[in-house]
Amino acid sequence: VQLQASGGGLVQAGGSLRLSCAASGLTFSSFHMGWFRQAPGKERAFVAGITWSGRSTDYADSVKGRFTISRDNNKNTVYLQMNILTPEDTAVYSCAADRDRGQRIGLSGGQYEYWGQGTQVTVSS
């Protein structure tokens, strides 16, 4: 299984980025997907999640109204559209896959079975 995250970079505060995570080696439509981030000196934190069908999403309070998670099961890809970025959003962003067993979107990283390598997002003030 591979989860390949891309789309990170350096952006000014107020700007936007779109992250992508391409999955291979798994039945993508059988997995809920999540985005997590880890800033220097901080623990990994949940950012957003989406069910296997795309019908349900969940967000951390800190990104609600600014970030949007979506997926394309035909392309085996999950996206994270990030708008109105602030320096506090600076982190390594990773995608993760959680096999659907009827559970809700996982807010804890321990619930996820597979992880991508992460992509750096840096927001300058």
Image: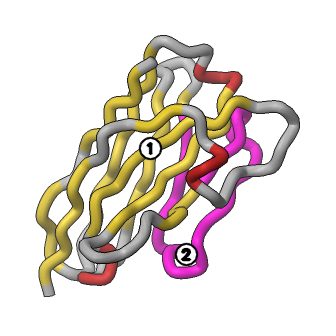
Quadrant (top left/top right/bottom left/bottom right) for the C terminus? bottom left
Position above or below: 91 against 65: above
Q: Give the labeled residue for mark 2.
A: 65
Instruction: Please tell me how crowded label 1 is: few (under 14), some (14-19), or many (20+) other residues with Cα within 10 Å.
Output: many
Residue nearest the viewer, comparing 27 with 55: 27
Position above or below: 10 against 27: below
Which of pointers 2 and 1 indicates the residue nearer the eye? 1
Q: Position of residue 104 (x, y in %)?
A: 80, 49
Residue drawn 83% across and 31% down?
101
Position above or below: 24 against 110: above
Marking on residue 114: none
Q: Is residue 51 magenta?
A: yes
Q: Secondary structure at mark 1?
A: strand
Q: Position of residue 100 (x, y in %)?
A: 76, 32
Residue drawn 59% across and 22% down?
28
Q: Position of residue 8 (x, y in %)?
A: 22, 52
Quadrant (top left/top right/bottom left/bottom right) for the N terminus? top left
Residue drawn 66% across and 23% down?
29
From this viewpoint, which residue is outermost toward the bottom? Answer: 125
Q: Are marks 2 and 1 in contact (CB under 8 Å)?
A: no
Residue nearest the viewer, comparing 114 with 81: 114
Residue drawn 51% across and 80% down?
62
Q: Which residues are magenta?
A: 49-71
Identify the image quadrant of residue 92: bottom left
Mark 2 to mark 1 CA distance (whole Å): 20 Å
Q: Position of residue 39 (x, y in %)?
A: 30, 71
Q: Give the labeled residue for mark 1.
A: 95
Does 36 sit left or right of 4 as displayed? Answer: right
Does 51 sit left or right of 118 as displayed? Answer: right
Residue nearest the viewer, comparing 45 with 76: 45
Q: Could you tell me the amino acid type at mark 1?
A: Cys
